[in-house]
Image: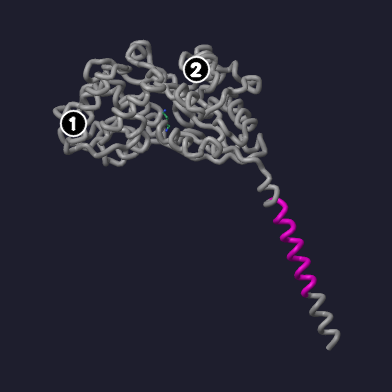
Amino acid sequence: MKDRILKKILSVTAVLSMTMLTQGFSAAPAEAQSNVPVLNLFTWSDYIDPALVTKFEAQCHCKLVETDYDSNSEMMAKLKLGGTSQYDVVVPSNFVILEMADEGLIQPVDHSKLSNFSNLIERFQNPTYDPGDKYSIPYQWGTTGMVYDPAKLKNPPQSWSLLFDPAVNPNYPFVLPKGEGRNEISAACAYLGYGFNCMAQDQWVAAAKLIKQTRKRPNFAGFVDETPALSQVKTGLLATSIAFNGDVGNCHADGSCRTLQYFIPKEGGDIWVDTMAITSHAKQPALALEFINFILDAKNGAQLSNFNQYASPNAAATPMLQPVLLTPMFSPPDTEMSRLVFLSPLTGAKLKLFNAIWTSAMQ
Ligand code: N2P
């Protein structure tokens, strides 16, 4: 009897020690895992190759957590609600950088940690929207124009009239982006003859009135940002929307939207630079700089563009780009460049006024 009890105790001990041993083995990496630093990247949808994320994680011995947004306004609203310490790196467009710096959402970049900075094309090393790249480092650049489905809209004019003239599209569903309003007000301004980068209050008001009328058309299907709107054009839900060139290039490349057409309206469209910036209360500023420098590497920069189909600001990456990225859709020729405009930044009272006009246009 004693023997059986002893045996039982021994076998229970053996099981327990085995369990401790195996748990011990499996607990070790989990513990290590929890000690791994985490870089929180807040970026636009479909904007980074998952293979690049894995490559960076292996290099930095860290974890990269990606969260996506579809407009600068969505990103800035989340930063204002505590995101300045939740995220480390954000990817704002050129025309909101001054506003973000002004509002204390981002911090200056320590250039001494960016050994790959000189890989940038010269004009991106000292851009007018952020002299000396003080707060932001170029990520990708591109254009904003119109996408349409030629099976529905036959040879429409290459004009913003595709959005704003009911005679051009009386029936097919279309949307407008709900973002920060710059592209929408600017497109309406361009259509009205004020130029794409309109800055006067009366021009904004006229543009807002046009958007209000447009919203009332029976085929207006709502406010949807550019990237999700393109998905709806692809599935056939919409016939047209405002779009970013690379998003259309991306679905041309993967075969999911071969027939869709993209153009920059004759009245002018937006040329933009998306950049990497570090949030004002980033928990991992050193890792953030390591990530920025990683993207500035020639090979990584090429892999980024070859994945997301946007033009690269990286001169050293250029020889490794897919040839399609050097065609007019991604690298607009001079004739198109002359129609492309950098949106001016807005801050202070002027920004408040713009926001009030845009908000009322959407209501
Ligand atoms: C990527 C969207 C690019 C952002 N899907 C345009 N600023």
Query: Disc 2 and disc 1: Cα gap in Å?
Result: 36 Å
Image coordinates for residue 222, horizontal then vertical, percent: 26, 39
Q: Is residue 283 left or right of residue 148?
A: right
Crowdedness near tag 1: few (<14), some (14–19) or many (≥20) residues, C-alpha within 10 Å? few
Task: Let me know if residue 83 is in the magenta part.
Answer: no
| Figure check: 128 above or below 153 | above
Q: Is residue 271 left or right of residue 173?
A: right
Image coordinates for residue 351, horizontal then vertical, percent: 37, 24
Q: Quadrant of ligand 1?
A: top left
For label 2, the SS is loop
| Figure check: 291 above or below 124 | below
Q: Residue at x 56, y 34 (%)?
A: 88
- Name the mark on residue 130: 2
The amino acid type, in three-letter code, at marker 2 is: Asp
Q: Is residue 309 left or right of residue 208?
A: right
* Image quarter of residue 209: top left
Image coordinates for residue 70, horizontal then vertical, percent: 40, 35
For label 1, the SS is helix
As drawn, which residue projects farthest toward the front? Answer: 349
Q: Which residues are magenta?
A: 12-29
Q: Residue at x 62, y 38 (%)?
A: 57
Task: Let me know if residue 28 is in the magenta part.
Answer: yes
Image coordinates for residue 363, horizontal then vertical, percent: 25, 36
- Name the mark on residue 213: 1
The amino acid type, in three-letter code, at marker 1 is: Gln
The secondary structure making up most of the magenta span is helix
Q: Residue at x 66, y 47 (%)?
A: 33
**Nearer to the camera, 354 or 109:** 354
